[in-house]
Amino acid sequence: MAGRRLLLISNSTSHGTGYLDHCAEVMAETLAGVRRLLFVPFALHDRDGYAAKARERFARMGLGLDSLHDAADVPAAVAAAEAVFVGGGNTFRLLDALHRTGALASLRERAAAGMPYLGASAGTNVACPTIRTTNDMPIVEPPSLEALGLVPFQINPHYLDPDPASTHQGETREQRIREYLEENDRPVVGLREGTMLRVEGAGVTLLGTAPARIFRRGADPEEVPPGSRLDGLLG
């Protein structure tokens, strides 16, 4: 996957900003030269409404948008796309639809060949080898938890730090990721709100407004500031 061009965003809306506003500049850089975008709305139930929202946002960036749920032939639509944006929502619903429509293999092939792939939240989760580090409820049961595998590590979007003032006694996000690492040996990047990973070829860069927290089996978590190169995550 030496030619991959990925932008993996933690969240599509940040506090005090509109839809995709906080990452619009980086998205425009990733989509340089693209005239029309293919949108994947499968993570939400109201696909028509979701597509309309995305279409209006990308029109302000000078881009046309087609929604994959309108395609008569889903794999063919992916094969013809200049670039793809996979929106957020429920990761289990998204992955199930990617399996059922035949989009999963087509997306993997095109993104591996260098087609720009942008994902937010659930769209970031499915870029990983599996969706085992999502925060979502399994409201549907996909045929497998295996996802696109566009990167060899896992991501936990919307990563939250423990609140020292909270009286909640349930597991923190860090504890849940440590549980994952008890059973799995892939690193996990905790992407806080307002952050994203740009993957270009063999390079990975953390962008945004907050540090990321990287978890590895048998090691203490590592905090990395925005602007850090994380190429080692690609092995």
Image (cartoon, rainbow, N blue to C red):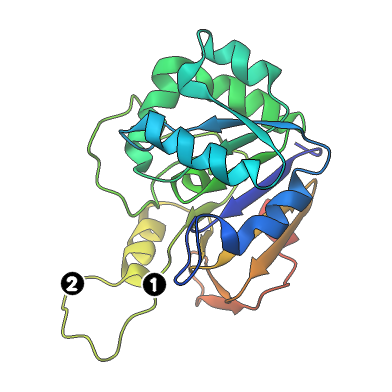
Q: Relative to the observer, which residue lies in front, 128 or 23?
A: 23
Expressed as whole percent of the image width and height from the top left, the position of residue 155 reads: 50, 55
Residue tagged by mark 2?
170
Q: How far apart are marks 2 and 1 (CA)?
A: 14 Å
Q: In this view, does 217 lie to the left or right of 137?
A: right
Instruction: Tell me the quarter of the picture where residue 36 sits.
Output: top right
Q: In this view, does 175 lie above or below 74?
A: below
**Three-letter amino acid code of the residue under disc 2:** Gly
Categorize mark 1 by other alpha carbons within 10 Å: few (<14), some (14-19), many (20+). Answer: some
Q: In this view, does 176 lie to the left or right of 122?
A: left
Residue 86 seen in render: no
Q: What element carries label 1?
A: loop
Instruction: Give the farthest residue toward the bottom.
Output: 165
Q: Is residue 211 left or right of residue 101?
A: right
- Which label number is shown at residue 4? none
| Marker count (numbered) | 2
Q: Relative to the observer, which residue lies in front, 195 or 138?
A: 195
Residue tagged by mark 1?
160
- Residue for point 16% across, 85% down: 167
Q: Is mark 2 on a helix, strand or loop?
A: loop
**Three-letter amino acid code of the residue under disc 1:** Leu
- Residue for point 50% across, 31% down: 40
